[in-house]
Structures are given as C-alpha cells and as structure tokens.
Amino acid sequence: MQKSIETWFTITRIGVVSLHGVNVECQRTVKHIPMQILINIKLRNGVKPQRSTTVTTMKKNYLLILLCILVSIFVWTVEYQSIVKRETVERYLMFSGNNFLQGRIWTPVTALFVHGDPAHLIGNIFFLYVFGNTLEGVVGAKKTMAVFFFGGISSFLLSLLLYPPGILMIGASAAIFTVTAAVMLTKPLKFSMLFMLPVGLVAIIYFIYNLVAVYYEVGGNVAYASHLIGFILGIPFGMALSPKWARNLLITIALLILYVAVTLALSMFFSFSLGSF
C-alpha cells in the first residue's frame, strides 16, 4: 500500500489493466476498483470523467391543466368574437344526454376541458394541481390519467340518471373529485401549501360540502351530484392503489375530527374574548 497507484496500475491504450504483471480486461475488473482509482485511471488515459445527470420529466398532470386552459380560452374566444354560434359549441364540445344520444359520443371527453368562466377554471386548476400532482407522484402518470378520465367520463354518463337530457355539463370537477378520493386513500397526510392543510382533510371537507349542497338542494349552475358521483368512483381506485387504504381512511377521519374540534375551540375562544369587552 506504500507504493503509488502508478506502480500498481499501468493503463494501456486498448483498455487493459496490468496488475502485478497480470493483464485483466477493464470491463471485468472495474466493479472491484474504488471510484478514486477509476478516476485516476481515466485521467491517465486522457478521458475526462463525466458527472451523472438526472433527467427530470414534466408531470403529465400539467398537460391536463394546459388542456383545461387552452380549450376554455378557445371556447370563450370563439363565443365572444362570434366566430361560431353558441349552439355549435354546445352541440360539439359540451356534454348532454341529447348530444350523446345523437351520436356525439366524444363530448364526455371534450366537455372535461371546457369551463364556464375564469373562476370555474381557476378553481379546478388549483385542485387539479394539488391532487393530480400528488397522485401522479405516488402511482405514476398512467394510473393518474386512468383515474382522471374514467372518473370524468363515467360521472357525465351516470349524471344522465339525475339530470334531464337537455342539461349541458362541462368542466373537470367530477374527474378531479375522482382523483381527490384516490389521493385521500393513498396519501392523506401530504401537506398542501396551497390549501395549508393535509390533502386528505381537504378531500373529505369538500366531499361533505357537496353532500350538504345536494341534501339542501342548493341551486345554481354547479352539478354537486356529479361531484359526489366522481368522488364515489374514486374510492375503488384508492383501495386498489394503496394496500393501506383502510389506515389512510382512519387518518382522514381523525384529521376531520381534529379540524372540527380546533375550529369549535377557536370559535368559542374568540366569542368569549369578544363578549368580555
């Protein structure tokens, strides 16, 4: 070991190591040689060692977000500029029972990316960004796409049982609710800086909110029942994607109980504080 590396190794131009007079092919010896020795070997041969690089690919979930933005802006533009009639857009891009039964079977897909106004679009982008990225990070892009499209398309079709065939339905909300339920059962403790809450807690809060809206028959242009259908469709996906789904469900319920307890405690504290003045 007192001898220098040069006396132990002689590197030839054809890539053969001479070790105490015994020639051994580099390919067979390299895995037994420490990294620093390999670097010295490469340098003596005039080969500069290269740094290992990690290739980062864009999440496929961002493509869904981009499609929502582009398709919505396209629809708003052509309607505002009167390039095509509103009826044409409704017939070929939006989903309804009439459209589907009249042979426009692609509308459950195109309607996913059409949004009624900027508030509708931005709200869905926020949820899709948080929950879509979370699910893709856990199960991968292909399974995330499968959850999104299956949930969205199926929710549109099942909604025909609840709404008249002439009602138009648009937006990715139901598909996102499917993704949300799957995330709740796979990674509920993932903290969202956007919502400042664990994603499992956000998921169950919005499920309860839509459940209450359906129960009290809240009006407006929001298809709360379709959201619930999407969420319910996401539960089997979450169970299939996570062997610990039961534990994750209990974690989500515990988070909800803690959230309600803290909210009530703070409400009582501030009510008492304000009443004492």
Image (spheres, helix red, strand yellow):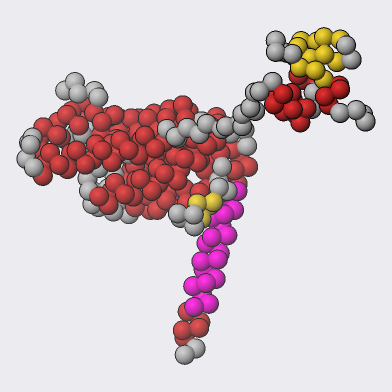
Whether 203 is drawn above or below 233: the answer is below
Whether 211 is drawn above or below 186: the answer is below
Residue 41 horizontal/vertical position (percent): 74, 23
Q: Residue at x 52, y 72 (%)?
A: 266
Would you say residue 148 is visible in this rendering? yes
Residue 58 horizontal/vertical position (percent): 44, 34
Q: Nearer the viewer, residue 202 or 223?
A: 202
Residue 102 occupies quadrant? top left
Residue 107 occupies quadrant? top left
Instruction: Give the magenta part as a residue range.
Output: 251-270
Q: In this rendering, would 148 be left or right of 87?
A: right
Task: Give the mark count.
Answer: 0
Q: Nearer the viewer, residue 216 or 186?
A: 186
Q: Residue at x 55, y 47 (%)?
A: 190
Q: Residue at x 65, y 23 (%)?
A: 47
Would you say residue 96 is visible in this rendering? no
Q: In this rendering, would 148 be left or right of 122?
A: right
Q: Is residue 197 magenta?
A: no
